[in-house]
Amino acid sequence: MIRWILISILSIGLIGIGVWGYKEHQEKNAILIQAENSYQRSFHDLTFNLDLLHDKIGSTLAMNTRRQLSPQLAEIWRLTSMAHSDVGQLPLTLLPFNKTEEFLSQMGDFSYRTAVRDLDTEPLTEEEVDTLSSLYEMSGDIEQELRKVQNMVLNENLRWMDVQLALVNNDEPADNTIIDGFETVEKTVEGYTEGKLNASLLGTSSDKDGFNMLGDQVISQEEAEETMRTVLGLEENTALDLSKTGDGANVPLFSGSFQENNRSGYIDLTQQGGYPLSFMINREVKESKISLHQAMQTAEDYLENSVFSSDFTVIESNQYDHVGVFQFVPRDGEVWIYPDAIQVKVALDTNEVIGFIAKDYLENYHERQIPEAAISEAEAEEAVNPNLRVEDHHLAIIEDDLGEEVLSYVFLGTLDSDTYKIFIGADDGEELRIDKLKQAEIKY
């Protein structure tokens, strides 16, 4: 009797395991099918959008009415944005496809820049028309290559999940038709960018060279460890795990991490120059004992005594739970340099600096020739909404929508219970952008 009961229990258990395994298999297949459908949709959308893009650029070249030209260029910008989004949804993370993505980004910037300007007073130049012609030819070649891939995908029922597995497992790319096709597209784009496109018109030239302030002197691993211990405030007997980025990294770094008692943290240090890029100390931050203003003074003192020698001023301060977060920018005389921002986090229980991010400063800092403002502060303020009450103002270098640095007047204004920053171009009085400042979050 007992034997039959045990057999029945085991049988029920085996049946249960079988049902569970079958359901797991079904759920896994459902997830894979959903991912495959998403990849297929993104790929076919990409092909369709590039078809439209090629046609729209061709139509632009044939136009002679400036009234229609701006909307057409705006449509090109929209299509490049959609195509860029489609690429981002494909499993190409491990496949070099940066030239094509860069091309889409540059074409979007070029079309946007020309679409928003007054083409009646500043029509397309011959160089810009030549650039459009090159873009038309280039988009046509990309369109044809993608159509070949699309034809093979449809005729041979190729799956994008196989592409993802091939890339993750480092399989030979030659064994995958889709990967071969996208590598051909990438080589096509690379050939154009090296010889046929006007880089300056596409906005690829810049007065700044990313991370050029780091210099050429590379610090040793021993020097890196000593700097890390000083920045993190670690004792000699605290273990510090140290590693460095491999060859080919955009910014070679030393990375360090530690764990002691109830405290841990990490730090990234540039190999060139030994500058702290960022660090974070993780611990329980208890009840606040100091004010946000006191913490701001601590952050200011920290920057003043750091390797960053600029004259900094705070542009934003916020409190999250018991941590103060402060955004600083350097000043060049009376002009605030917004692209070169540094963030400092201070614990409000012990007044300790527990976080630091200097990526923007290290990447963007360079010698600038700051132009004179073409309009006065009073003239700029006339462009501010009269319903706002202006509380403060200053001159600043900011980046516009295209990533280009421009001189602007910054007005701090209030409307009802909200606070805004209004940026007015110092050369023409145009409203560049408006930022709504964050308020303390409500706890529910």
Image (cartoon, helix red, strand yellow):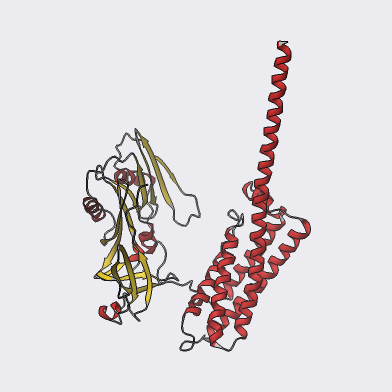
Q: Is 395 situated left or right of 25 in this image?
A: left
Place of residue 249 in the rendered image (x, y in percent of width and height, measured from the top left): 48, 54
Query: Residue 20 occupies which quadrant of the picture?
Result: top right
Residue at 26% across, 55% down: 303
Place of residue 89 in the rendered image (x, y in percent of width and height, measured from the top left): 59, 57
Q: Does the rendering let one see residue 214?
A: no
Q: Nearer the viewer, residue 188 or 66?
A: 66
Which residue extends farthest top?
Answer: 1
Q: Is residue 1 above or below residue 295?
A: above
Q: Nearer the viewer, residue 223 or 189?
A: 189
Residue at 58% across, 89% down: 64
Q: Nearer the viewer, residue 103 or 30?
A: 30
Q: Is residue 407 above or below residue 330?
A: below
Tell me the quarter of the image containing the N terminus. Answer: top right
Residue at 69% across, 39% down: 25
Q: Does the rendering let one see residue 263?
A: yes
Q: Is residue 272 above or below residue 265?
A: below
Place of residue 173 in the rendered image (x, y in percent of width and height, measured from the top left): 68, 54
Q: Is residue 61 above or below residue 357?
A: below
Place of residue 343 in the rendered image (x, y in percent of width and height, measured from the top left): 33, 55
Q: Is 369 situated left or right of 102 in this image?
A: left
